Image (spheres, rainbow, N blue to C red):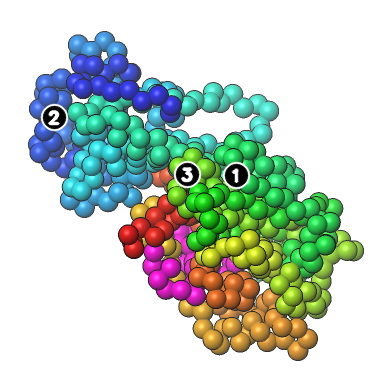
Amino acid sequence: MKIVKEAKTFDQVNTEVLIVGVQKNCDHIEGWKDFVSFYGESVEDWIRTCDIDTDRKKLTKLPYTGQNGQLKRVLFVGLGDTKTLTENELRETFGIVGKQLRALKVNEVSIWLESFTANPIDEETIAFLFAEGAGLGFYQTPNYKTTSNEVDVYMDTVHFVTNGDIDEIAAAYEVGKIYAESVNEARNLVNLPPNLLTATELGHYAEKLAKQYDFEIEILTKTELEELGMGGILSVNKGSVEEPRLITIKYQATEKWEDVIGLVGKGVTYDTGGYSIKTKTGMVGMKGDMGGAAAVLGAMKIIGEVRPNKNVVAVIGSTDNMISGEAFKPDDVITMYSGKTVEVLNTDAEGRLVLADAVTYAKQQGANYLIDVATLTGGVITALGFDKTGSLTNNEEFFDAFIESSIETGEFVWGMPLTEKDKKRIRKSDVADLNNSPGSDGHMIFGGGFVGEFVEETPWIHLDIAGTSNASNAHDLGPKGATGVMVRTLATFVERLGEQNN
Ligand code: BES
Ligand code: ZN
Ligand code: ZN
């Protein structure tokens, strides 16, 4: 979706498809009478007889046979009672529209913005949500089938039927498009098979991103990590023939490197569990264990495009977790980058070891705030299911601001408690400062809490996306597979941080 055009009246529409919102009661829409006389009075009968479904998220595709020679069909989009329509539901509705447009193989559409207005959702917001929702719904998981005859289609032009300010509408649309494209790129990373996406390859991707957006980038190799003594990431990497990487990207918008937001991602490109090995069914899908890294990179892409007046450092620890004669073992005692020692009780609790070193590094690079994001524990799925990201924090004010952003994006985040008793259990070991697996009860909290031991006083939020990073079924905003969760919330949060105080 690249080109934005404007049509002031229905006669000026010159695409084959026009998208029109139908509400439970369309009469209050100023242009409705014009639309009825353009399309034909039967439209009102069809709404009465439910041949055009006004129920929310229901689509009705009908031909157009009137004067306008270009237009072939109208896609009616049910909105239900717009008094209860939320922005998130509208985004999801547009997700379904995106899927339909892909199925119709159209690459040019018109959308009548006013038909979607609902107090307080204005035309600019609708343009944003359309770009974002349809862009996400449009996504298809890449495959490697040699027999595939799928013709790839892209919506490259959108026309707005509007009397509003087209420049403002186009600007909002462009931002929505960037949000969707960045999530889709993160989804592509997570969906990549682990033989193709190694830590080295993830580094190459980050390099390309940095070049595209003029970010400062540093990629530390195994030898460099050894020189620095990054025992967390190196221990996890020990059983692998693949090199680990610590990827650091900086986006500096103000003259001074201050008020720096640190985004830290778990980039485990494959998690076998190591010697605490996963079951043969539990291992399948562990290519997605770099979902946190993908979320951070996706957010950085948005930041690179939108260029907010904020300073951001992104740090990604990347390796796979494999077994061999060299691999780390339960009972090992390792020394982390911070100098703290850890008794390894479970090699499958590897993400926290990688994250801890990355967090220490982010602090050293000047991060004044920290958000880590990781597919960290199965425990979060047991606690919250597949539709809620679990979180921990050491700073309620910081967390409240984050929740505001997550409400805006519709990505559900739920705070879990981290008590002094939990911390005591993380610090309990006869031989080291910490242990990496205090128990299976409430282990989402131990996973994040372990990372918290390295954060110390810096305002911090931990996001466990093990449940939300991958969808086992298709949903309104995409197919099954990688969701790209938290890309939008992280970027929105970076854009909004500090605004509340202004
Ligand atoms: N990568 C897994 C967590 C995970 C589980 C991600 C399911 C996606 C879906 C993580 O490294 C892990 O294995 N965690 C263990 C922790 C346990 C050993 C303390 C778990 O959740 O079982
Ligand atoms: Zn694991
Ligand atoms: Zn893992």
Q: Indicate the position of residue 164 as horizontal and vertical percent values.
A: 21, 31
Residue under label 1: 215
Q: Indicate the position of residue 139 as horizontal and vertical percent values.
A: 49, 37
Numbered circle sitting on residue 31: 2
For image coordinates 20% across by 34% down, the residue present is 114
Crowd rating for badge 3 (residues with CA inside 10 Å; few <14, some 14–19, many 20+): some
Q: Are marks 2 and 1 in contact (CB under 8 Å)?
A: no
Q: What residue type is labelled 1?
A: Phe
Q: Which of marks 2 and 3 is nearer the N terminus?
A: 2
Residue under label 3: 307
Q: In this view, does 2 lie to the left or right of 241?
A: left
Q: Earlier in the sequence, mark 2 or mark 1?
A: 2
Q: What residue type is labelled 3?
A: Arg
Q: Which of 69 and 422 is in front in this view?
A: 422
Residue 293 shown in magenta: no
How many circles with numbers are drawn on the protein? 3
Please give the range of residues in magenta: 377-401
- Residue 348 seen: no
Q: Which amino acid does label 2 sit on?
A: Gly
Q: Can you say which quadrant of the picture contains the N terminus?
A: top left
Q: Nearer the viewer, residue 238 or 169?
A: 169
Secondary structure of the residue carrying tag 1 is loop
Above/below status of 44 relative to 262 = above
Of tags 2 and 3, the one toward the viewer is 3
For image coordinates 36% across by 25% down, the residue present is 4
Q: Nearer the viewer, residue 136 or 165?
A: 165
Distance, label 2 to label 3, CA atoms, is 37 Å
